[in-house]
Amino acid sequence: MRKAIIAGNWKMNKTPAEAAALVNELKPLVKDAICDVVVCVPATNFQAVKEAAEGSNIKLGAENVHWAASGAFTGELSADMLKACGVEYVVIGHSERRQYFGETDATVNKRVQAAVNAGLKVILCVGELKEEREAGYTDALVEYQTLIALTGLTNEQVEEVVIAYEPVWAIGTGLTATDEQANETIGVIRKALARKYGQELADKVRIQYGGSMNPKNVKGLMAQPEIDGGLIGGASLKAADFSLVVNYDK
Ligand code: PGA
């Protein structure tokens, strides 16, 4: 019912030449994917990736966006700037932005609103810290993070948002949530959406898992009924690995 979406999150990696080489290698490997394929890349690589991905099924994404249309925000990029570079998707609220760059639920919400209103497709990241899981707060936390981030959107806009459930303790650590843990927490997010927006809408929202997802664990995770794709960090930096994740059904 929901089309899966596998997105790479390159983080702060790759020069434009390396980016073009990776996309060129990736193109033939993912051309028959049954899911949406996205690469979210540093802004310095937009042009190179757009050119290399031309005519393929690989979509261009950014890793962040500012909420203002323009102005005195040194180092930031607006939604219209991203769109003008051919960007379709944007990751918002990644845990690294929350941990290292002072991102809060309130600023995540402002970024989500600006991105959606400009016509970008949002990949909204939520997820708990290890201590929060151990203390039993995971469900309350992911519900809160999700609903506050979507505040101010119309139901039609909420339906188009992709949510990435990424337990922070599983990111870049080699630790993955078990298939069941990931499925259960994504189910909690979907129930929260159903309570606020109705079951019909909640059933349409695509919710990815992220956190050390790789060619070895992708099949098990994707076999879970609630999991609609993945946000892939480390394993998205090599064409061979990323294509195996994208081709999880083969
Ligand atoms: P990882 O990163 O796959 O390297 O754990 C995932 C992410 O941060 O989105």
Image: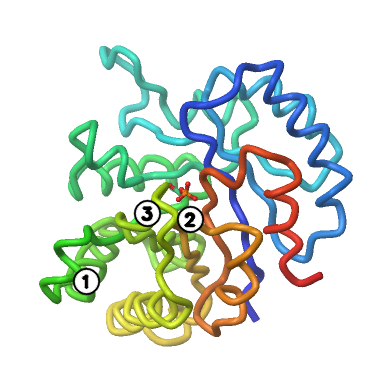
- Which of the 4 image quarters holds residue 87? top right
Give the amino acid type for the residue marked by disc 2 in the picture: Ser
User: Can you say whether 90 is above or below 223 in the image?
Assistant: above
Sequence-wise, the earlier of marks 1 and 3 is 3
Give the amino acid type for the residue marked by disc 1 in the picture: Thr
Depth check, mark 2 against mark 3: the one in front is 2
Dot 1 and dot 2 residues touching (CB under 8 Å): no
Q: Which one is in front, 71 or 186?
A: 186
Q: Residue at x 54, y 51 (%)?
A: 232
User: Can you say whether 211 is above or below 134 in the image?
Assistant: above
Classify mark 2: helix, strand or loop: loop
Image side of residue 96 versus residue 87, left or right: left
Classify mark 3: helix, strand or loop: strand
Depth check, mark 1 against mark 3: the one in front is 1
- Which of the 4 image quarters holds residue 96? top left
x, y percentage for residue 235? Answer: 59, 47
Depth check, mark 1 against mark 2: the one in front is 2
Number of residue marks:
3
Residue assigned mark 2:
212
Tell me, for residue 10, which label it has, or none: none
Q: Residue at x 43, y 83 (%)?
A: 180
Which quarter of the image is occupied by the C terminus?
bottom right
Which quarter of the image is occupied by the N terminus?
bottom right
Sequence-wise, the earlier of marks 2 and 3 is 3
Q: Residue at x 38, y 62 (%)?
A: 154
Residue assigned mark 3:
125
Mark 3 CB in 8 Å range of ligand 1? yes
Q: CA distance from mark 1 to mark 2?
A: 19 Å
Circle 1: is it few (<14), some (14-19), or many (20+) Cα within 10 Å? many
Q: Which one is in front, 199 or 38?
A: 38
Residue assigned mark 1:
138
